[in-house]
Structures are given as structure tokens and as C-alpha cells.
Amino acid sequence: MKKIQKKILWGLLVCFGLSLFHIGYSSATSFSDEMKETTYRFLQYVEEGRYEAADAVLTKLRRDYSIDDKEYSVVFQDVLNETQQALNDSRVVPEEKYHKSLTLVLLYEATWNKVDPLWLSWKDHLLTEMTNEPLKNKDRLQNVYSLYERLLPAVKVSGTKESVHILESHMKKLHEMQALIDEDLQEEQISVFAQEVKEVEVKRKKSLTEEPGFIWLMGSVGSLISFTLMYVGWRKYKGEKTDDTEKKRERDS
């Protein structure tokens, strides 16, 4: 009996330890300092116009730091492909190469910086562009649209679903607005956009009790406790039945 109880106790301890490991592993960042340095070095090469060197670093990023999360892997692949195509196309102007590259850096940075990602600063820059001066020409509208493009992939990774919806709906309307002539209507719409962009935020980090590992731990411990109680009850019942049988034998004899 004591041996079985010890085994059950060890089982509980093992489950508890494995669950804590699972929670810690899931919540910890999987990105090394080397990966961060590689990402920023890539952007530096692009700024310096060293596109071949930047392309080599980009290939390393793609090879060594793949994203396993299926929800975001498509986002990464799309941005990686667009950036690599821009770097290798001589017809693409340096400003566009830098825009695509910075979009990629913001995306990677959002994966390891969950609390205060760099894209929040670019959101503030977008608000400044939208509110400082009237957007009375297509060039300024295109500039604002480019800032939305730069933010969206990173927001998909670390922003709320509502934030993603806001950016995507704004981009669709901005594209349509470039064909409009009514400046008053345009400025009024941009003012509404600015108020909504202020609501774009980082998704709330799950508490410990919301983590899948914690839920799994509680289920495992609960199951083991139930099994232990059932076993103890069965042993007690069997013991009482054995006692009754022995007493009956004693009376019969």
C-alpha cells in the first residue's frame, strides 16, 4: 500500500514539474541575441546600400530563424519574399527597398518584444503624419498608406485582432480615397482614422491560469487525485470485506 502511494505521489510531482517546464518554455522567447543582432545588421546594410550583403543576411534569417507558429508563418513568408524581391530588383528605388526591409525588421522585433514593440513608435509617427498637416495630395496619402503597410505585419503578430481589423479597413479606404477630389470629406475621414489608430494596441499577455500548460496541469492533477481517492476507497472496501469474511469464518468455526 505504501509503495503504491509513493508511486502516485511521484507521478503527481513529475506531472507538476513537466507542466511548469511546458509553461516556461511556451512563454519564454525563442529568439537569441545573435538573431537580434543579425536582424539589425540586415537593416544597416540596406541603409548603406549594400544590397548583396543585406540579401545574404536575409537568407540566413530565413534559414536559421524560421517561425514554427502556423498562424504567423504565412505572414513571415510573404514579407520575406517581398523584401528579397525588392532587394534584388534594380528597378526598385532605395526608399522602397528600405521600406520593405524595415517592415521585416518590425515584424521580427514584434516576435521577441511582446511588451513594448518598436511598431508602437511607428504608430505614433503615423498619427503625427495624419494630424500635423492636411493630406491634400496623393503623395501624402501614399506616404500614410506606406506607414500602414509597414505596421500591419507586426501588428498581426503582436497586436489585438481589433487592431488588425482597424489597419486593414483603413488601408482599403485609403486606397479608394486616392481617387477622390473632395478634400473636406477626405480630411474628415482622416480625422476619424486618427482616432481609431489610437486604439491600436499590443495584445494582452495571457495570465498563468490561461496558459494551456496550466490547464493541462490542473487536469492531470485532478485526474490523479480522483484516481487516488477511487483507489483508496476500493482498498478500504476490499479491506472491510476481507474483515467481514474472516469474522464470519471465525463465527462458523
Image (cartoon, rainbow, N blue to C red):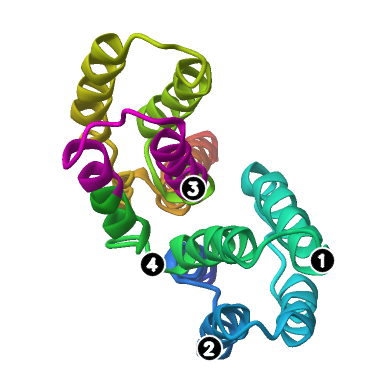
Mark 2 or mark 1, whichever is nearer to me: 1
Distance, label 3 to label 1, CA atoms, is 53 Å
Distance, label 4 to label 2, CA atoms, is 14 Å
Name the spot of residue 21 as percent of width and height, x first. 48, 71
Name the spot of residue 152 as percent of width and height, x first. 49, 42
Kind of residue sitting beneath label 4:
Asn
Q: Over which residues does the magenta segment extend? A: 126-152
* Residue at screen point 45% across, 39% down: 139
Mark 4 vs 2: CB contact within 8 A? no
Name the spot of residue 222 as percent of width and height, x first. 41, 43
Q: Main secondary structure of the magenta part?
A: helix
Which residue is disc 2 drawn over?
Answer: 37
Which residue is disc 3 drawn over?
Answer: 216
Q: Secondary structure at mark 4?
A: loop
Which residue is disc 4 drawn over?
Answer: 113
Q: Is residue 45 left or right of residue 151?
A: right
Q: Earlier in the sequence, mark 3 or mark 4?
A: 4
Give neighbour class at mark 2: few <14, some 14-19, many 20+ (Cα, 10 Å): few
Distance, label 1 to label 4, CA atoms, is 33 Å
Residue 132 within the segment the image draws in magenta: yes
Which residue is disc 1 drawn over?
Answer: 90
Residue 16 within the segment the image draws in magenta: no
